[in-house]
Image (cartoon, grey):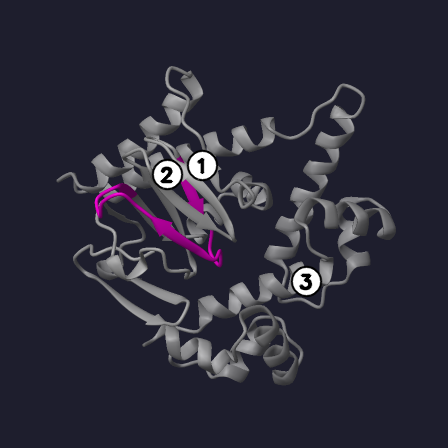
Amino acid sequence: MGTSHEGMTMGINKYYENLIFSGGSKINVSRKVDTNYFDTVHWHPYVEVLVSLRDGNAATINFTRYALAENDIAIVYSGDLHAVHYVTEDSFLIIQFPIALLAVMGELSRVLPQLSRCNCVRHVPGDAASEDRLRCVRAIDESYHSDDPFREVRAYASLLEFFARVGRLCMSAQPDAAAGASTEQANMKLMAEACLYIAENCVKPLTLNEVASEVGVSKSHFAHLFKGYTNMTFVDFLTTERIKLAESLFPNPKLHIIDIAFESGFSSISSFNRAFRKVKGCSPSQFRATMID
């Protein structure tokens, strides 16, 4: 969802929104919603935190509509199809940043598959954990708009604290019936380690058997656990990670599409084109054109 923050330019190609942060900034914070995105489904390769400042707002994320009361928080992850529905243009506090700011932290990277399924965080007035999450997002806003020469560093620190708290919320929401709680937690830890391993080694010719061996379980057991944890097959997850890497390489004008294909772990340009079109609905060249539009 675009904002009108000064210094940020925007290119739109149907559903795709390209956000460019100027001056080397990695975080953007605004309270002004671009009217181009009211009730309009779109996506972008950035994470977006939407703090509802009024009752009556709503956000639709991956075809699920969330009615938002004051201080409820909607979280849009990179690639999520979403639309915003607001009372007034200044109905949200909007925080945008690259997913890499979370993925660089191992502890957060391991729980990203869980975090990405948590698109709405309800505010419970008076609840200590809920108030702490709200305090974090307000601190991001205050730091970002301050005169502190390290304002973005302070905003980033609050951002990490916010997602650490959201991560704890997501983990506590997992089923923990006494009979299977310890096994469930152990399996979650294994799958988080597997996801991190795949993300860090996606340029290699990884196999399901290799990753299963890396985390110490059988191939068949790993396939079953992995599908339940990520809602994706191993091959689909690996392909998605490679395409994410390719997206990060597109802005480099020195790299040709074939270079990007090989640097992202694909064995041929044809396999890259097929996979990319299946995931994104367009060719790598078309997608790259929208990013630099």
Residue interval drawn in magenta: 73-93
**Measured from the top left, where is residue 228 in percent x and y?**
73, 45
Horizontal side of residue 131 vs 104, given as left or right: left
Label 1 and label 2: CA atoms lie apart by 6 Å
What residue does disc 2 label?
Answer: 159
Q: Nearer the viewer, mark 2 or mark 3?
A: 3
- Closer to the camera in the image, 118 or 56: 56
Q: Are marks 2 and 3 in contact (CB under 8 Å)?
A: no
Q: Position of residue 268 (x, y in %)?
A: 65, 82
Residue 293: quarter of image: bottom left
Separation (CA) of disc 3 from disc 1 = 26 Å
The residue carrying pointer 2 sits among few (fewer than 14), some (14 to 19) or many (20 or more) residues within 10 Å by Cα, namely many
Q: Which residue is mark 1?
A: 163
Marked residue nearer the N-terminal end (2 or 3): 2
Q: Residue at x 56, y 33 (%)?
A: 170
Q: Amino acid at mark 1?
A: Phe
| Residue on which the image places disc 3 | 236
Q: How many labels were placed on the picture?
A: 3
Nearest the eye: 58 or 77: 58
- Is 75 a magenta residue? yes
Residue found 61% across the figure and 73% down from its top: 278
Look at label 2 and name its amino acid.
Leu
Q: Identity of the amino acid at label 3?
A: Asp
> Dot 2: what SS?
helix
Dot label at residue 206: none
- In contact (CB < 8 Å): disc 1 and disc 2: yes
Residue furthest to the left: 147
Q: Does 148 sit above or below residue 261?
A: above
Q: Quadrant of residue 16?
A: bottom left
